[in-house]
Amino acid sequence: MGIQTELETATLLAAASTSILSTAVRPELVMERGQGMYLWDTDGKRYLDFVGGWAVTCLGHSPAVIQEALAQQSAALVLSSPSFYNKPMIQFAKLLTDITGYDRAFFTSSGAEANEGAIKLARKHGSIHLNGAFEIITTINGFHGRTLATMSATGKKQWEPLFAPKIPGFKHVPLNDLDACLAAINPNTCAIMLELVQGEGGVHEAEVEYVQQLRKICDDSGIMLIFDEIQTGFGRTGKLFAYEHYGVQADVMTLGKGIGGGFPLSAMLTTEAFNIFDVGDQGGTYTGQPLAMAVGLAVVNELIRLELPHHAEQQGRYIIERLHQIKDKYNLKHIRGKGLLLAFDLPKPVGAELVAACLQAGLLINTPNSLTIRLMPPLVVSATDIDVMFDLLCDALDGIFRT
Ligand SMILES: *Cc1c(COP(=O)(O)O)cnc(C)c1O
């Protein structure tokens, strides 16, 4: 950590403070490099990453398959235009429909865009098949993105007063409350949309019985069922997709985050019955973008080759076991989650302090709210990485609870 690098970091941070739009409070450091489970900042300090790019970098940082896919595809074709097919686009759509029960894929760049597509498709369905029904039922504490429509779909209390007027047509009901959902359904309802495990909401799982009942309601009424698997997809919960825990499939599934291993990529999958957009209803400059398609193809193939869903399930079990060992010492509560989407509650609202102490010690963890800590490491995490994480976490907990 020489004077030179410290000067460079200070210069960068000064420029950041005057040139980046203020939307987030970020720590006073600049990330420069990533490899496997670790990130390095411009001072050369190393961080063990249990945030995983926000449940995104499933293969770890800078995996060889992404480097190779980008090098090969960028040499061959960066972009033709959205009006043409390209080879990786077709190969990737074929792969995704082969590994799921879905028939059709539409590609975008971010999770919010995939959900926008699902919301538009739900309204299209309502207009064609349900006498113009347009309302979508979503869950309180659910999260669906930051565009105006997906913010409106999101059931986050703090967001209610923002950016009025919101997009109308969303009703929020408590997760796992079937009666509340039934009471919200009316002739205007065209879809029910939910995460099978609420990620941003603090890792809360939908119950199996509840989800199966939602499927039945949708089957009986013709209402479209949408699973937002942007955070839960691609092995995160210990299965390739979270719906495999439930034995039911939605009509539409949205995917993001892990699908590109860090490259901006998302998808909406539908059954043939919901292949109902008319030409021109949906599109985008970057739909089927060849670099993204090549990366997605490489990432998903690698994830399957390495059997990472199974690995995630095993490593998740080990983390839960270790959490139970320290639970009483630190008064931790509600250890929960599936695979490598895990959380626990603290006895006091010191989430931000704990995250800061861990950062100082070279460990990245997440606090979705002041009482909750969420762990979502790359799916390649090893038992040794987990042991190192617990050493750092316990030191930080000791420091915080000593005072
Ligand atoms: C992250 C997330 C989104 C939004 O994805 P972006 O890529 O940030 O637009 C939507 N739904 C869920 C469940 C998510 O976790």
Image (cartoon, rainbow, N blue to C red):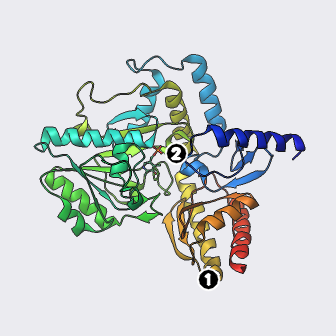
Query: Please, which residue is most extreme toward the right here?
Result: 2
* Label 1, residues with CA under 10 Å away: few <14, some 14-19, many ≥20: few
Q: Amino acid at mark 1?
A: Asp
Give above or below for 339 relative to 109. below
Q: Where is residue 145? Give x, y as percent.
A: 42, 47
Query: Please, which residue is most extreme toward the left here?
Result: 131
Badge 2 element: helix
- Label for residue 328? 1
Whether the residue carrying mark 2 lies under 8 Å from ligand 1 is answered with no
Q: Where is residue 208? Give x, y as percent.
A: 34, 65
* Label 2, residues with CA under 10 Å away: few <14, some 14-19, many ≥20: many
- Label for residue 269? none
Q: Residue at x 50, y 25 (%)?
A: 290
Q: Is residue 98 visible?
A: no
- Label for residue 258? 2
Q: Residue at x 43, y 65 (%)?
A: 204
Quarter of the image for the C terminus: give it: bottom right
Badge 1 element: helix
Residue 74 appears in which quarter of the rendering?
Answer: top right
The foreground one among 6 and 240 is 6
- The first of marks 1 and 2 along the sequence is 2
User: Alpha-carbon distance for marks 1 and 2?
Assistant: 33 Å
Q: Where is residue 142? Give x, y as percent.
A: 38, 58
Q: Residue at x 74, y 46 (%)?
A: 40
Q: Amino acid at mark 2?
A: Gly
- Residue 84 vs residue 302: left or right? left
The foreground one among 246 and 124 is 124
Query: Please, which residue is most extreme toward the bottom here?
Result: 328
Q: Where is residue 134? Give x, y as percent.
A: 19, 46
